[in-house]
Amino acid sequence: MTDPQAVRLLLQPRVREVLGVFLHAESTVGAAARALNMDIRRVHRDVQSLRAAGLLHETRLEARAGRPIRHYRASAPAYFVPRALAPDADYAERLERQYVPLSRTLARASGREFERAIAEQGHGREWGLRLYWDGEAVQIDESYEDAELRGILTGWQGPNVLIFGGLSAGPLLLAEASEVQAEFIRLLTRLSGLFEANRAAGRGQPFAVWGVLTPVNEAELVVFKS
């Protein structure tokens, strides 16, 4: 795909979502808006832009009392934009722009939930920083002052809160890294199914899960281990 108008549309995340509704089957503006939980006027504008760019075509006109309903379908089963045509072709810069706001939002949400749990479940116990010898090595962590002198990996001693955050950095064999990657994919696939089922049933509360696995150089490794 090299047409400038089509490329411009395909590089917009929201427009890609709208186009995606019409990839596997024909649909209408109203049905697409409901499926995406978007404002119908915004979806209508996107559909008209996609049609003008040749990315959508009208399949049929459904007669009814009043204005007829137009059905559309994507003009191709798949689309491809060469990396060279993307304005943010540098993946490192693009991911940095994406990750920074995400990490800040996750940090705020996690911190807020943790503060709530400490306040509600502490029962007068003091929470703070600990420095101690666990029999094998010096440990630095956070816990209650009267908690046992053992690390989090031997059993959590803090408030009952559904938060988990951890960072591990070190050498892996390529086969081991591939196995970890597969475990991440299985977890995210399972989560996707749970999220979809709960959204459809109108139950549950919002949660966010974020996992990153990537090779690093020696200088970056020092940052992660500091």
Image: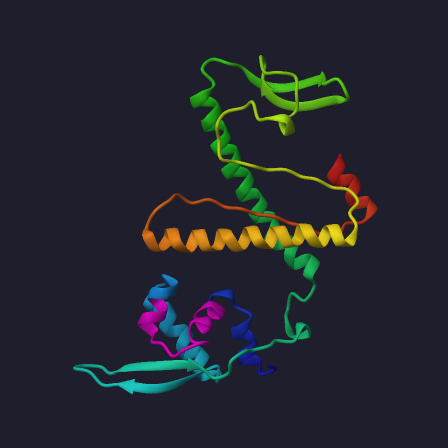
Is 19 a magenta residue?
yes
View extreme (left): residue: 65
Q: Is residue 89 left or right of residue 121?
A: right
Residue at image x 38%, y 70%? Answer: 43
What x and y, as percent, mark residue 84? Answer: 69, 74
SS assignment for the magenta stretch, majority: helix
Q: Tell me where residue 61 sits by quadrant.
A: bottom left
What x and y, as percent, mark residue 79? Answer: 56, 78
Is 28 a magenta residue?
yes
Of 199 and 19, nearer the camera is 199
Of 19 and 187, nearer the camera is 187
Check the image and report above or below for 103 versus 159.
below
How many marks are shown on the rendered structure? 0
Check the image and report above or below for 85 versus 117.
below
Residue at image x 59%, y 55%? Answer: 185
Range drawn in magenta: 15-33
Residue at image x 81%, y 49%? Answer: 217
Residue at image x 22%, y 81%? Answer: 67
Q: Tell me where residue 175 sits by quadrant.
A: bottom right
Q: Quadrant of the image for the N terminus?
A: bottom right
Q: Is residue 86 left or right of residue 54?
A: right
What x and y, as percent, mark residue 132? Answer: 71, 17
